[in-house]
Amino acid sequence: MKIAIVSDTHNNFVNFKKSIDWANKKGVHMILHCGDIQTQQVIDDSKESFNGEIKFVKGNGDYDLDLPEKMELEVDSKKIAFCHFPEIAKKLATSGKFDIIFYGHTHKPWEEIVNNCRLVNPGELAGQLFKPTFAVYDTITNLLELKILDNLK
């Protein structure tokens, strides 16, 4: 299954929608949003725009949103977790329960291995500090790609 991972949209639905449109065209089945969405309207509009399922966790900018701090799921026998804060992600990674964990908050794309677990930040979609990016993970091939929004085809 192909999963898109986004974070830190900060109410920039225009950029989020570009990633959603690309995901729809490329057969992505699920989107995981690692927080800092900021408004319920962005959640509602994204769910309406995406052909698959979108899951959200709460970031530090999501004051009024009733979302979980973290989520865990299993897809194609891959144990996945996602959250907003790197500290929580690292704690989850050290548990030894997960194959891959996604997080946000820093706005910077990053990947490292912690306790045999891939720890991945997809960057930010808002374009506040860095170019807007997101990640795509294929649970079957274990391939992880960083996508730069301005370079999407």
Image (cartoon, rainbow, N blue to C red):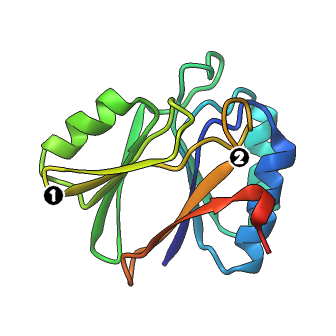
In the image, residue 28 sits, relative to residue 125, either above or below, namely below
Tell me residue 90's x, y (percent). 25, 37
Q: On the image, which quarter does residue 87 sit in?
A: top left
Pointer 2 residue: 132
* Residue 119 in the image, given as x and y percentages of width and height: 32, 49
Query: Is disc 2 surrounded by few (<14), some (14 to 19) or many (20+) residues within 10 Å?
Result: many
**Numbered badge on residue 56:** none
Where is residue 73 drawn, in percent x and y? 36, 58
Residue 69 falls left or right of residue 56: left
How far apart marks 1 and 2 lie (CA) works out to 28 Å
**Quadrant showing the C terminus:** bottom right
Q: Mark 1 or mark 2, which has the lower sequence index?
A: 1
Identified by mark 1, the residue type is Asn
In this view of the protein, which residue sits in the foreground, 120 or 129?
129
Q: Which mark is residue 116?
A: 1
Residue 72 vs residue 7, the one in the foreground: 7
Asked which secondary structure carries label 1, the reply is: loop
Q: Is residue 95 above or below residue 61?
A: below
The residue at the point 74 percent across, 57 percent down is 149
Residue 112 left/right relative to 68: left
Q: Residue at x 78, y 39 (%)?
A: 42
Instruction: Choose between 91 and 133: the one closer to the eye.
Output: 133
User: For this view, does 65 lie left or right of residue 104?
Assistant: right
Residue 120 in sight from this viewpoint: no
Question: Does 3 sit above or below residue 46?
Answer: below
**Quadrant in the picture for residue 64:** top right
Q: Amino acid at mark 2?
A: Pro
Is residue 56 positioned above or below 86 on the image?
A: below
Q: Secondary structure at mark 2?
A: loop
